[in-house]
C-alpha cells in the first residue's frame, strides 16, 4: 500500500480512539489483562510488560509465570497479581500450562503473550496452543512470535482477535525472509501478512507501521534511544491493557504505538537517547498520556 494512502497518527487521531473514563467507574470497568511471560533469566520481560500494562489505564493485571518464578514476581509487582503456572525443569512454561491459561479466559478480557517465555520446546508449544485457542483479544510478541514462525500453520484461524508486534527480525522469521527484505518492503509485507492471517500487525522500527490489511497507519513518534532491551515488552503490556479496556485491535495497536513512542521521546529529552532504558519509558508514560489528552494540535511534535 502506498505511503500516501496511509494515515499518519497525530495527537488528535489518537485522542479520538481513547475509551471514556466514567466518574462512577470501578476496576472492572476498565478490564482485566492476563500476561503470560517470563522464564528463568527473563523475569524482567514479565515485569516490564506488567508495568506497561498498568500505565495503560487497565483496571487489573495478572501475570502468569512458571511456578518457580511466582514468588519473586509477587515481590516485584506491587500493583499486579502473580499466578504460578506448570513449569519445565528449566523453569519455562510447560506445555500443560496452556490448559491453565485457557481456563482463565472467562475471567479475563485480553491476554498479552510472549515476553521472555524462551524458545524452550514446551514453551513454544504452549504459546502456539494459547495463540490458537484464546477466545478474546490477544497480543503476541517476542518468543510467542518465534514459536509461531517455527510452525506457521499455527497462525491460521485463531478463535479471537489478534495483534502481532514484531520487530523486523521477527517479521522476517514469520515470513521466511531476510530482515533486509522486510526493511526494504515494510509498507507492503505488513499489510499482506495481516490480510493473509486475519490479524493486526504492528511492525516496529523507524516509522512503525500498524495495519489490519485494509488500513495502514504510520507512527511518527519514537527515537533510536528506544532500541534497548525491554522497550518492546513495555509496548506489549501497553497494547494488552488497551485491548482489555475494549479497544478494537487496530485502534489499540495505533494508540499503543503512538503513546509508547511519545513516552520514548519524553524519556530521551530527560535522559538523552544514549542513556534511555525501558524503565524510563514506563516512567514517561503518564506525561505522554497527559500530552495526548490535553495538548492542542499546534503543540504536536
Image (tube, rainbow, N blue to C red):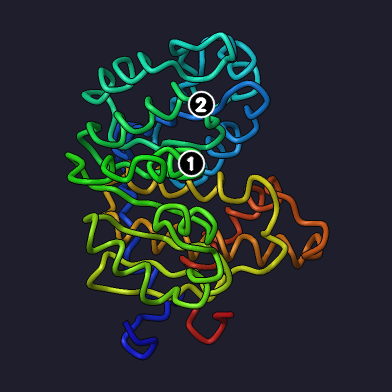
Percent from the top left, x then y, of residue 93? 47, 19
Q: Earlier in the sequence, mark 2 or mark 1?
A: 1
Residue at the location (37% across, 34% down)?
A: 33
Residue at the location (53% across, 87% down)?
A: 298
Percent from the top left, x then y, of residue 137? 27, 42
Secondary structure state at the residue bearing disc 1: helix
Quadrant containing the C terminus is bottom right
- Please state which of residues 54 and 212 is positioned toward the viewer in this rendering: 212
Quadrant of the rendered image containing residue 30: top left
Where 142 sits versus 176, above or below?
above
Left or right, 159 with respect to 209, comes to left
Percent from the top left, x then y, of residue 18? 35, 59
**What residue would you read off at disc 2?**
80
Quadrant containing the N terminus is bottom left
Secondary structure state at the residue bearing disc 2: loop
Q: Give the crowd class for mark 1: few <14, some 14-19, many >=20 residues within 10 Å.
A: many
Cα separation, mark 2 vs mark 1, equals 9 Å
Number of residue marks: 2
Pointer 2 with pointer 1, Cβ within 8 A: yes
Where 128 sits versus 82, above or below?
below
Left or right, 39 with respect to 126, comes to right
Residue at the location (50% across, 18% down)?
A: 82
**What residue would you read off at disc 1?**
53
Residue at the location (40% across, 46% down)?
A: 149
Q: Give the crowd class for mark 2: few <14, some 14-19, many >=20 residues within 10 Å.
A: many
Q: Residue furthest bottom?
A: 4
Where 17 sits versus 38, above or below?
below
Percent from the top left, x then y, of residue 2? 35, 87
Amino acid at each position: 500500500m502506498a505511503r500516501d494512502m496511509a494515515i499518519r497518527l497525530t495527537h488528535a487521531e489518537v485522542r479520538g480512539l481513547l475509551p471514556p473514563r466514567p466518574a462512577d467507574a470501578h476496576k472492572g470497568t476498565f478490564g482485566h489483562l492476563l500476561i503470560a511471560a517470563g522464564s528463568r533469566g527473563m523475569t524482567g520481560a514479565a515485569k516490564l510488560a506488567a508495568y506497561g500494562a498498568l500505565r495503560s489505564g487497565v483496571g487489573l493485571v495478572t501475570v502468569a509465570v512458571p511456578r518457580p518464578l511466582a514468588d519473586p514476581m509477587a515481590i516485584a509487582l506491587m500493583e499486579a497479581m502473580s499466578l504460578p503456572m506448570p513449569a519445565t525443569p528449566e523453569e519455562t512454561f510447560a506445555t500443560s500450562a496452556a490448559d491453565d491459561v485457557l481456563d482463565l479466559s472467562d475471567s479475563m478480557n485480553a491476554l498479552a503473550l510472549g515476553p521472555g517465555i524462551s524458545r524452550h520446546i514446551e514453551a513454544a508449544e504452549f504459546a502456539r496452543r494459547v495463540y490458537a485457542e484464546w477466545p478474546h483479544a490477544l497480543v503476541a510478541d517476542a518468543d510467542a512470535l518465534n514459536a509461531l514462525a517455527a510452525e506457521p500453520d499455527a497462525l491460521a484461524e485463531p478463535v479471537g482477535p489478534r495483534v502481532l508486534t514484531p520487530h523486523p527480525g521477527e517479521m522476517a522469521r514469520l515470513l521466511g525472509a531476510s530482515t533486509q527484505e522486510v526493511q526494504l518492503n515494510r509498507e507492503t509485507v505488513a499489510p499482506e501478512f495481516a490480510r493473509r492471517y486475519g490479524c493486526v500487525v504492528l511492525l516496529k522500527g523507524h516509522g512503525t507501521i500498524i495495519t489490519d490489511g485494509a488500513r495502514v497507519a504510520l507512527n511518527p513518534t519514537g527515537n533510536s534511544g528506544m532500541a534497548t532491551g525491554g522497550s518492546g515488552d513495555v509496548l506489549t503490556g501497553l497494547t494488552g491493557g488497551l485491548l482489555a479496556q475494549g479497544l478494537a485491535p487496530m485502534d489499540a495497536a495505533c494508540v499503543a504505538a503512538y503513546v509508547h513512542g511519545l513516552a520514548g521521546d519524553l524519556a530521551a529529552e530527560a535522559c538523552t537517547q544514549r542513556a534511555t532504558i525501558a524503565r524510563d519509558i514506563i516512567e514517561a508514560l503518564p506525561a505522554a498520556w497527559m500530552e495526548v489528552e490535553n495538548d492542542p494540535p499546534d503543540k504536536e511534535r
